[in-house]
Image (cartoon, rainbow, N blue to C red):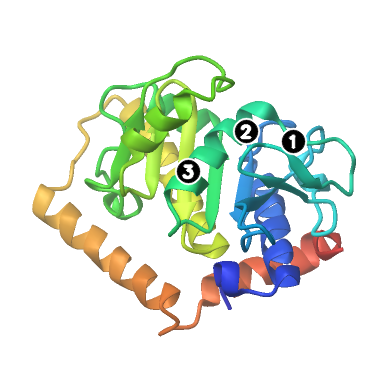
Amino acid sequence: MADGGVDTPLSELRRDLAAAYRLIALEGMDDGIYTHISARLPDGPDGEKRFLMNPYGLRFDEVTASNLVTVDETGAVVDDPYGAGVNAAGFTIHSAVHMARHDAVCVLHTHTVAGVAVSSIQEGVLPLNQWSAQFFGRVAFHDYEGIALDLDERQRIVADLGDKYVMLLRNHGTLLLGRSIAEAMKLALNLERSCRAQIAALGMGLTPVVLSDEVAEHTAQQYQAAYDSTEAGNAPDPEWAAMLRRLDKAAPDYKQ
């Protein structure tokens, strides 16, 4: 079953976030010790906003449910089992989104070669296939301002994101939001496939067949209806269940 966000038991939220880190690593979508996936936690005892992130310095394939770090909206560490804190640039981006978008349980940021390449062209993601059609008219853009250490950039990230769940950080990478960790992972995997397929198709030197706006929008709505049904609890999530089974075989220690 997909993670249900702040109403989900903390142990399950930690497990699912650790699973996301491991899945990104298995897919070769990590970047050493950089980039982050965060999950929003229930508010603290005084109403402070809190979320989980990876300990700074660990590779994604080293993240477990028990070593995730809890931070508040100011970046202050609330709980740090590993003892290394979190990456400041990661905090800037993720805290901005979590504080502004309360519908987003998970925020997932990557620096993949394909994602960075597509974020570096003016056109962004083209509707060339079924994977990429789901993002038609649903991708936000934020211009590169340097390494995200300036807290003032948070308001610009939020303004550029608007109400979308997918953003290309120009010349930088990708940012995905999910109403659950499962949804963010599915969006991230499909966006990565879309970027890889776009690079492959355009690299052949032949004429690409771009889907019509009507077909692309129809496909995007079909995807959206399926996501909405799952997030509303009206349908099971066999895709997320399959991902967790994969980890149970490939990296069972993620749950520790």
Residue under label 3 = 97
Q: Quadrant of the C terminus?
A: bottom right
Look at the picture and state if 121 lies above or below 233.
above
Asked if the residue at tag 1 contacts the one at tag 2, i.e. Cβ–Cβ closer than 8 Å, the answer is yes
Look at the picture and state if 140 lies above or below 213.
above
Report crowding for label 2: few under 14, some 14 to 19, many 20 or more residues within 10 A (C-alpha). Answer: many
Quadrant of residue 42 in the image?
Answer: bottom right
**Distance Cα–Cα, label 1 vs label 3:** 17 Å
**Foreground residue, 107 or 26?**
107
* Residue that appears at 84% across and 51% down: 67
Look at the picture and state if 10 lies above or below 36.
below
Residue 162 at x, y = what percent?
31, 43
Residue under label 1 = 86
Is residue 208 shown left or right of residue 197?
left
Please state which amino acid type lies under the numbered disc 3. Val
Please state which amino acid type lies under the numbered disc 1. Val
Specify whether residue 156 is in view: yes
Q: Quadrant of the N terminus?
A: bottom right
